[in-house]
Amino acid sequence: MRKIRLLLLEDNRLLREGIIAVIDGQPDLKVVASFGDCSKALQSIGTSKPNVLLLDLGLRNQNSLQVVKSVKKSFPAIEIIVMDLIPLESDVLDFVKAGVSGFILKDATTDDFLKTIRTVALGGKVLPQHLTESLFSQIVEFAINHSKPSTLIESVRMTKREKQVIELVSDGLTNKEIAQKLHLSTYTVKSHIHNILEKLALHTRVQIAKYVHTSDSNETINDQISLIEE
């Protein structure tokens, strides 16, 4: 049986040794190298020839995202799995766009841990469990399956009303003013804004306005957002 070869980059020695023990007990998996330092790990790839890189997202004093970018640039065939406690949505999106194929929560069961490794090694994609049912997962899934980050927004499906609200928020109108202009209740406007924030993976109405104004133009945004009926 040809084993899946793994390179482990984890700066917590006890955790690193525990992961190695779990993996090496599997007949189809093998840790070919393990490190707590990014530079040493990157230097070893040419000789260790891993199929999968297991990477701690929160390496102390080291840039995990830069490691992903470096590995995918020099060794695009290597699949990358990121390990973290509960990754932020923004971190997930950044790592997916950089080339990460899977995420493992550090409180995952052994079965889930091993299943994720095998799935990714075979070309599958695994998102964090706490995101798989959210609207944000639609955006991440799109990033996984498309190589051009600039087209990411095309995966977001807005209603015509939500598009109207986006435009009015970007113009600086308050919820009350938007409600009056669109003949809606303020509660309905708040609901629309909540949905928009989730779909665009943003947190505040200020970010919505900034998002619009830092894009090429309102016309470009209108063209890119997929519309559905209310």
Image (spheres, helix red, strand yellow):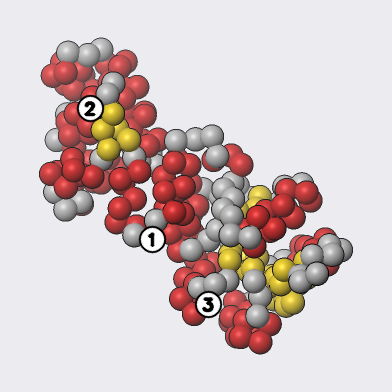
Image quadrant holding the C terminus, namely: top left
Query: Label 3, on which residue?
Result: 75
Residue at position x 72%, y 68% in the image: 4
**Residue 42 at x, y percent in the picture:** 59, 80
Q: Are marks 3 and 1 in contact (CB under 8 Å)?
A: no
Query: Label 2, on which residue?
Result: 160
**Residue 131 at x, y percent in the picture:** 54, 40
Crowding near the residue tagged with mark 3, few <14, some 14–19, many ≥20 C-alpha atoms within 10 Å: some
Mark 3 or 1 closer to N-term?
3
Residue at position x 54%, y 34% in the image: 133
* Kind of residue at disc 3: Phe
Q: Quadrant of residue 59?
A: bottom right
* Kind of residue at disc 2: Lys
Can residue 94 be seen?
A: no
Disc 3/disc 1 C-alpha distance (Å): 16 Å
Q: Is residue 95 left or right of residue 185?
A: right
> Farthest residue in the right direction?
25
Query: Label 1, on which residue?
Result: 147
Mark 2 or 1 closer to N-term?
1
Crowding near the residue tagged with mark 1, few <14, some 14–19, many ≥20 C-alpha atoms within 10 Å: few
